[in-house]
Image (tube, rainbow, N blue to C red):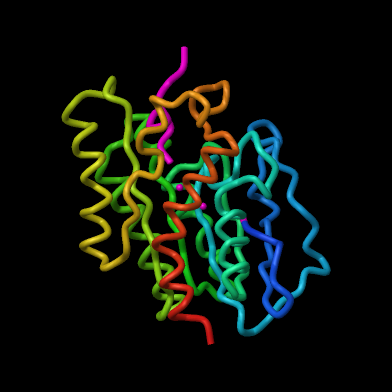
Amino acid sequence: MRLPLCAILILFLVSCGSPSDREATITVPEESVTQDESSVTPPSTADAPTSDDSVRIVFLGDSITAGYGLNTESAFPALVGMQLADAGYTVRVIDAGISGDTSSGGLNRVEWLLQERVDILVLELGGNDGLRGIDLSLTKSNLGGIIDKTRQAWTDAEIVLVGMEVPPNLGHEYTTQFASMYPEVAASHGVKLIPFIGEGFGAITHLLQNDGIHPTAEGHRIIAERVLATLEPLVSSLQP
């Protein structure tokens, strides 16, 4: 039985395909791919070009960010990176997606990710919290904690929160409060919000893999367009 994409909730990795005078490189943290849940094979980055002028974008998320079921180059963060490079920006995207991760997991590992400069953090977590029926006050606190830790480490970092939704079988009250939690966190912490990026996917079967949950390559292309609309102005403002 196929479930709508919101049954796992979504958001961000990234690219290599760049113009002659620009670059887009990808770093995949060693912990970001789980052997039992992800088929992604991260590319080697030992000799990847780097630049002090690059805009470092960290995608902190779950299986959607990790590109579950696809190769890294087909996942939406990689697509976003390639499109930014094609537009003339120099970016470095760090894939910090872990399949099955929760907001608590993200809070526990964010300090490790913050050891290196973060210019933009794309925060795509909370979906697995919702599926487990975790108290929303804890998820809200964790998301806020990740934002606060990022700002403490990198004062000028731009932060983008990705909104999530949960399936209606969890109850109308929980579903409604869960969806409204993301705008509330974004407003209270002064960060940008991307609405639920899987909107409409449940009714279009070819946008989901056979599990009825994770986006196909085409689904990731649509997600990339939605994410890019928010990220490109931020990258433009940060690019020297």
| Residue occupying the far left of the picture | 173
Check residue 6 for magenta coloring: yes
**Hey, which quadrant is residue 180 in on the image?**
top left
**What are the residue bounds of the magenta stretch?**
1-13
Q: Quadrant of residue 127?
A: top left
Question: Is residue 153 part of the magenta span, yes or no?
Answer: no
Compared with 8, 98 (above or below) is below
Q: Is residue 234 above or below residue 74?
A: below
Depicted 2 relative to depicted 23: above or below: above
Quadrant of the image occupied by residue 86: bottom right
Percent x, y for residue 177? 19, 39
Q: Nearer the viewer, residue 81 or 125?
A: 81
Q: Position of residue 94 (x, y in %)?
A: 61, 61
Nearer the observer, 4 or 188:
4
Residue occupying image coordinates x 52% and y 82%: 239
Horizontal and vertical percent position of residue 46 = 81, 66
Q: Nearer the viewer, residue 208 or 112?
A: 208
Residue found at x 47% / y 77%: 236
Q: Please, what is the dominant secondary structure of the magenta stretch? A: loop
